[in-house]
Image (cartoon, rainbow, N blue to C red):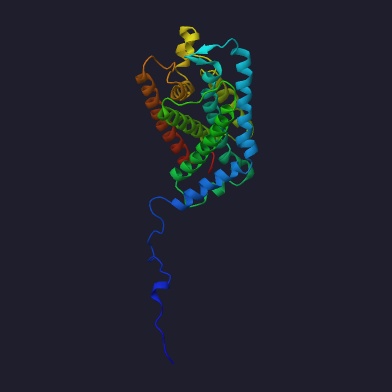
Amino acid sequence: MIETAPDTDRMIKFSPPGTPVMGRVNRLGLWTLYMKEVRRFFKVQMQTVWAPAITTMLFLVIFTIAMGRGDRIILGVNFATFVAPGLIVMGMMQNAFANGSFSLLGGKIQGTIIDYLMPPLSNFELLVGLVGASVTRAVFVGSAVALAMMLYPDVSLAMHHPWAVAWFGLMGAIMLSLLGVLTSIWAEKFDHNAAVTNFVVAPLSLLSGTFYVIDNLSPFFQSVSRLNPFFYVISGFRFGFLGQSDIGDTNMAVLHGALGLGALNVVLGLATYLVLRSGWKLRS
């Protein structure tokens, strides 16, 4: 009988006992969570992507007919071109919030919250996965809205500053995603979620200069508008397309707004992480 040596190259090698299998970041787990959340909203894309695009287009049609007659010019362009960027990023922010505010709340109501808390994911990885999926939905919605608006007469989406489009769109989506996750942690039923949507997100979106420039307001309400972070997202995003903004008279003012949004998201992200790590209304 001839004995053959085992093929050591094909032998399964296991890590010694006590040696961590995962690195500092659970990449596979994070990617799995992210894809789960993306597939969840993409499975019903007619409701989560295309329906918001149609709703936003209706805003454009109605306000263009009501306020855009007589070739009205704002910031050097016609009304339809002026309002289009604001509607795009408004749709992105609202849907980023809708996605971020559902996952943990749905888990609490359906009794599946353990599926988020039990896997070997850190609180930071859980937060990144949820926010990443919400930002992805925002990008899908923004792309769908932009595609539809390209077909609308008299709308030009030529970009003067692509960096501003990318930065303010991303900052707006992240801000609302984090706010959505915070709402999802706090809420105990869908009515709580709807209350934040109706009394916080919707008013701040509509009163942020989407359909007007704040120079038309009285000095008091101009000051109030400048306290609204949604105003900087929408005006900065519009600046990327038109090359002009009502944030300030210089490009430096837009840059300050961009840095301010970045700082706000860092603070909001840290607050969300600390609340998530505490387990408040999740593990108790």
Q: Residue at x 40, y 32 (%)?
A: 266
Number of marks drawn: 0
The x and y percentages for residue 236 are 44, 23
**Of residues 81 and 133, the one drawn nearer to the viewer in this rendering:** 81
User: Residue 99 vs residue 227: left or right?
Assistant: right
Seen in the picture, residue 260 relative to 3 is either above or below; the reply is above
Residue 78 in view (yes/no): yes
Residue extending furthest left?
252
The quarter holding residue 202 reads top right
Looking at the image, is 221 positioned above or below residue 102? above
Quadrant assignment for the N terminus? bottom left
Question: Farthest residue toward the bottom?
Answer: 1
In the picture as drawn, the residue positioned furthest to the top comes out as 218
Q: Look at 53% across and 47% down and name the residue there.
A: 35
Residue drawn 48% across and 49% down? 31
Residue 246 vertical position relative to residue 190 in the rendered view, above or below: above
Q: Position of residue 32 (x, y in %)?
A: 51, 50
> What percent of the width, then of the height, locates residue 91?
56, 28
- Residue 96 visible in the current orientation: no
Q: Position of residue 195 (x, y in %)?
A: 60, 27
In depth, the one of 78 and 238 nearer the eye is 78
Position of the C terminus, as image quadrant, is top right
